[in-house]
Amino acid sequence: MKITILAVGKKHDPKLKEAIYDYSKRLNHYVKLEWKLLDVKLPTSMGNERIRTLESDAIRKELRRNNTSILLDERGDHLTSPELANTIQGHMNSGVQNIVFIIGGAFGVDNNLLDQVSFKLSLSKLIFPHQLVRLILLEQLYRAHTILAGEKYHHI
């Protein structure tokens, strides 16, 4: 199976890059991991709603019909790490070839994209910087796969 992380924004923050690389390498032991960073060029005078629409359009262009899309959103479902592992396992069992995790821009995504995705996931009730969300998501994906493999990384 393949996991794609589709994130609005430029390259990884240099302060987080080493940890992102480390967890990417670890996760590649279980699945093929692909990063797609969308550097959407926006005029500085543009309003939040228009930014949200343009970024959502860029995300939509990357989505494929046969992929499962999971949007990270503060209003999404809260899952424990074992529940996330079970969700991933369920998709694997149903023959899903690619799960796309979407990290929107600073102003979120538009309602059309919210309606289009397969699932909305919240990593926390707290709000994190988008660069940090990349690392938190990676760690949770790695944790989920170690749970599925019965390895000792996850402690309850």
Image (spheres, helix red, strand yellow):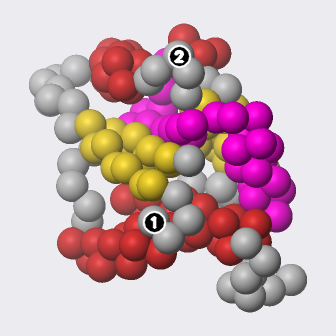
**Secondary structure under the numbered disc 1 in the rendered image:** loop
Q: Residue at x 43, y 55 (%)?
A: 33
> Residue at the spot x=71%, y=49% of the render?
88
Position of residue 8 measured from the top left corner of the image (x, y, whole percent)? 33, 39
Q: Residue furthest top?
A: 112
Residue 80 found in image quarter = bottom right
Position of the C terminus by quadrant = bottom right
Q: Secondary structure at mark 2?
A: loop
Image height check: is 155 above or below 48? below
Query: Which of these two is toward me, 43 or 138?
Result: 138
Give the image location of residue 127, x and y in percent: 57, 55
Give residue 28's mark. Answer: 1
Q: In the visual, does 130 lie left or right of 58? A: right
Between disc 2 and disc 1, whose residue precedes?
1
Q: Is residue 101 visible?
A: no
Q: Residue 101 at x, y = what percent? A: 52, 42
Q: Is residue 136 left or right of residue 89?
A: left
Q: Which residue is mark 2?
A: 65
Label 2 crowding class (10 Å Cα cut-off): few <14, some 14-19, many 20+? Answer: few
> Which region shows up in magenta?
81-110
Residue 54: x and y in percent read 31, 18
